[in-house]
Image (cartoon, rainbow, N blue to C red):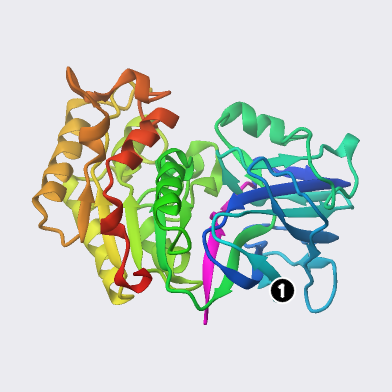
Amino acid sequence: MEWLTSWSYVDTDFSMFPIYAENETQRMWYRNNIDSSALRIKVSNKYNRYPITVNRMTIACSDEDGRVASDGCTLQFDGCDSVTLGPGEVRYSDVCSFNAEAGSWIAISLYVKERTKITAATSSQSNIITRIAAQEGGDFCDSEYVSGERFIDEAREFIALKPLYNVVCCIVSSVEVYTDQPVSSIALIGDSITQHGNWGEALTARLYDAYPGKVTVFNRGICGNKILHDASIRTGFGMYFGINALERFEDDVFGDNRVDTVILQEGVNDIINPADGMCPSYETIESDDLIAGYRRLIEIAKRHGARIFGCTIMPFKGFREVWNPDNENKRNDVNSVLRSGALGFDGLFDFDSVLADSSDKTRMTEKLTADHLHPNKEGGRKLAESICLDNLITKRSC
């Protein structure tokens, strides 16, 4: 028997655009692929500067639209229905008896009564969250459906700046289930291309359809993240882009429980951020710097006994003003080394070849991207379909 992550996103720092919750119910839901009779929730106030009190949190089976068919189970924390997390505090709920079946949808609802300033949350572009706005508020944790505005008060400024993002339940960091089944655990780590979920969720759906009860996938992507350098205040988003992947990799991927396979999609921000004014010019990197970063990440994964797959860096010409011949040469140099197999990845997913325009390899195919940097839903689907699923499943789940 062991605890395995059934769903997860990364806590990020929203202190530049605080969110206020008051008399508000939030609900998120996800597709589970592990058979289990017990689960626990990891709640986090890791980057928040203020305490957060959640007056009630429930978990229930739902449909894929987040509709709950019956009353759920109220989660407890040291025997209490409510939980208060101090600044930086991370903890688990009490273990809850709950029948989680592979292929089922699970909904988590929480209620915040008093006006609370939130400067950290988990974010996702995926349509897996609705919320009750303060003026329509109340405890709707047991309601069939939770509807209302996602963004209120100061968060409107955030959504105007970053319209691709939703804010997931303010303290829910992960769901872990207790199981004795042989399950392959796969972590996706990267930047916004991973965090958006367009390719990761398409891949997850393929894996869950092909291997019901045999694999679990969770997302550790952070928008704007880089391999070699931390977020810069010059971005206007503060520390939202997170600490560098070399520092966060071990904790974000291996900190909670077993991971068999890692898919690493990252590196483009290291190349383009100096050209975009998103960081100081002294953070300009060379292709060899990025290659050395990949080597260190591979070493960490191997130290944990995990396989690690890499991804080539996709084209970005047309995204703002970041493209220039020097940056394109860096991208091509890194991709050449990745394709050579010299770094020691257990496999490579050539995302560049999948999405590059056939008439101009410096650009993504127009219909597969919304902004010339990020794959859209269709682009994400094509990336997911380019991956051989059998390569990702370990003997553990056979």
Residue 12 highlighted magenta (yes or no): yes
Q: Is residue 240 above or below residue 147?
A: below
Q: Label 1 is placed on what type of residue?
A: Ser
Task: Tell me what residue is drawn at x 55 percent, y 67 percent.
Answer: 35
Task: Tell me what residue is drawn at x 91 percent, y 46 percent.
Answer: 138
247 vs 264, nearest the viewer: 264
Residue 89 visible in the current orientation:
no
Main secondary structure of the magenta stretch? strand
Q: Position of residue 363 (x, y in %)?
A: 26, 23
Residue 81 highlighted magenta (yes or no): no
Quadrant the C terminus occupies = bottom left
Quick one: label 1, few (<14), some, or many (20+) residues within 10 Å?
some
Q: Position of residue 182 (x, y in %)?
A: 42, 73
The part of the chain drawn in magenta is 1-14
Q: Position of residue 160 (x, y in %)?
A: 62, 26
Mark 1 = which residue? 97
Task: Tell me what residue is drawn at x 31 percent, y 67 percent.
Answer: 394
Q: Is residue 28 above or below residue 101?
A: above
Q: Is residue 64 above or below residue 142?
A: above
